[in-house]
Amino acid sequence: MFKKLLLAVTLFFSVHAGFAASTATPSVDVNKADRPALESIKGIGPAAAESILGERAKKGGFKDWADFETRVKGVGDARAIKLSDAGLTVNGEARPAGAKHAESKKGESKKGESKKGESKKAADETVSLKK
């Protein structure tokens, strides 16, 4: 009886392990992928795939995740993390979870600066002087 139970448990785990391995998320490198491969990633549809391929054709491969986020419209920190979790890689590397995009995008000011380059403190002082 014990041998049959042990055999059943062993069989269950071997089948389960095989199933888990077959459902693992495939990785797709953004610099090597074609349209169907990009669209196989959850969160990338036809429009996003076209944007990625167009940017890659225009300026070459993406250097890293920060470069990818800067060049592809609509991809910021949160979406990059989701795409990485879904299996997208840049040069074979998943996006580091804690990494923040360092460069500011067009029209955005860096934290603590107004668009004219004044520090936030200087801008606040100007407002308080006008009161």
Image (cartoon, rainbow, N blue to C red):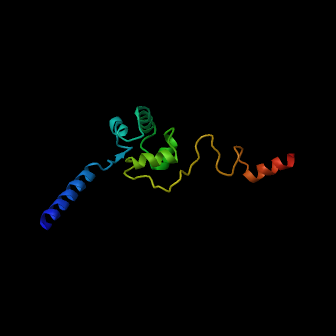
Q: Is residue 89 visible?
A: no
Asked which quadrant contains residue 106, the reply is: top right
Q: Is residue 40 visible?
A: yes
Q: Position of residue 52 (x, y in %)?
A: 43, 38
User: Is 111 placed left or right of 99 in the picture?
Assistant: right
Residue that sits furthest to the bottom in the current view: 2
User: Residue at 34% across / 37% down in the picture?
Assistant: 34
Asked which quadrant contains residue 42, the reply is: top left
User: Residue at 35% across / 35% down in the picture?
Assistant: 35
In the image, 7 versus 64, the foreground residue is 7
User: Residue at 73% across / 51% down in the picture?
Assistant: 120
In the image, 57 versus 15, the foreground residue is 15
Quadrant for the N terminus, please: bottom left
In the image, 126 versus 4, the foreground residue is 4
User: Is 64 placed left or right of 22 in the picture?
Assistant: right
Give the tally of numbered discs: 0
Q: Position of residue 125 (x, y in %)?
A: 81, 51
Q: Position of residue 26 (x, y in %)?
A: 32, 47
